[in-house]
Image: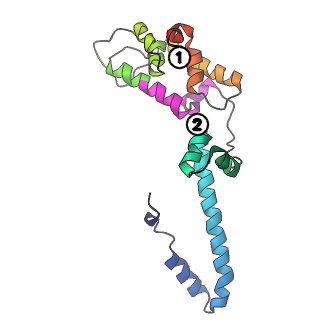
Amino acid sequence: MEPNQLTGVTLDRLVAALEAAHSDVRDRIPDAMLVAEHLSDLGDDLIEHVVSTARAQGVSWSEIGTRMGVSKQAAQQRLAKAAQVELEPLSPEQGFTRFTIDARNVLITAHEAARVRQEPFVTRARIAVAAGFESAAALLPEPGATSHDLVPYDDEAQRALARSFEVAIAEGADMVEVRHVIEALGSDVAASDA
């Protein structure tokens, strides 16, 4: 978004409001200071909100710093307190909302590949292939005759996804990361590429 797309608050409108409120230019000074402070606070609130949302969705401090044009440490120092989102303890009942963006992308890739290939289920092997373990392709099911928009996870894949929460919880993590999913998949689907 370009700053000029923000049409609600402009310098001309602020000046007009101050002029309408005070005929004497000297009386406009304290109000101008107040408005400037409010706009600065509002800008800080906007940044804090966006960063808190990004952190809750698993965006790393490194990426936030890069997007802000500062180091990871500078971003954390400036915004860590604001980004402390009160998250409920991890639980499999929370579903994919507690997976990082990267972990969700692995699952989306697995689902899409199973759908395109007309596999009857998303399996542990399909998730392993999506996570980069090509040797797991030998364990994939044969394609089916029909395709479905929504391919269900088989029982083993569901257990592995639930186990990924256990791995993350044991580590004290706030979100399920790709490495938690990989560990939960088990050594039989990921061992030969490790």
Position of 120 relative to 32 (above/below): above
Q: Which residue lies furthest to the left in this view?
A: 145
Crowd around label 1: few <14 · some 14–19 · many ≥20 (10 Å): some
Please state the horizontal and vertical placement of residue 167, each as a whole percent of the image: 65, 20
Please name the amino acid that badge 1 sits on: Gln
Q: Disc 2 designates what residue?
A: 58
Query: Residue at position x 60%, y 50% from top?
Result: 70
Q: Which of marks 1 and 2 is nearer the N terminus?
A: 2
Frontmost of labels 1 and 2 is 2
Position of 104 relative to 130 (above/below): below
Disc 1 on helix, strand or loop? helix
Which label is found at residue 158?
1
Please state the horizontal and vertical placement of residue 82, each as a whole percent of the image: 68, 49
Q: Is residue 128 left or right of residue 145?
A: right
Disc 2 on helix, strand or loop? loop
To which quarter of the image does residue 40 belong?
Answer: bottom right
Please name the amino acid that badge 2 sits on: Gly
Please state the horizontal and vertical placement of residue 142, each as a whole percent of the image: 34, 8
Quarter of the image for the N terminus: give it: bottom left
Magenta stretch, residue numbers: 82-109
Query: Residue at position x 69%, y 43% from top?
Result: 84
Do the residues bearing badges 1 and 2 touch, measured as CB atoms within 8 Å? no
Please state the horizontal and vertical placement of residue 87, each as a whole percent of the image: 67, 37
Crowd around label 2: few <14 · some 14–19 · many ≥20 (10 Å): many
Query: Residue at position x 64%, y 26% from top?
Result: 91
Query: Residue at position x 62%, y 23% from top?
Result: 165
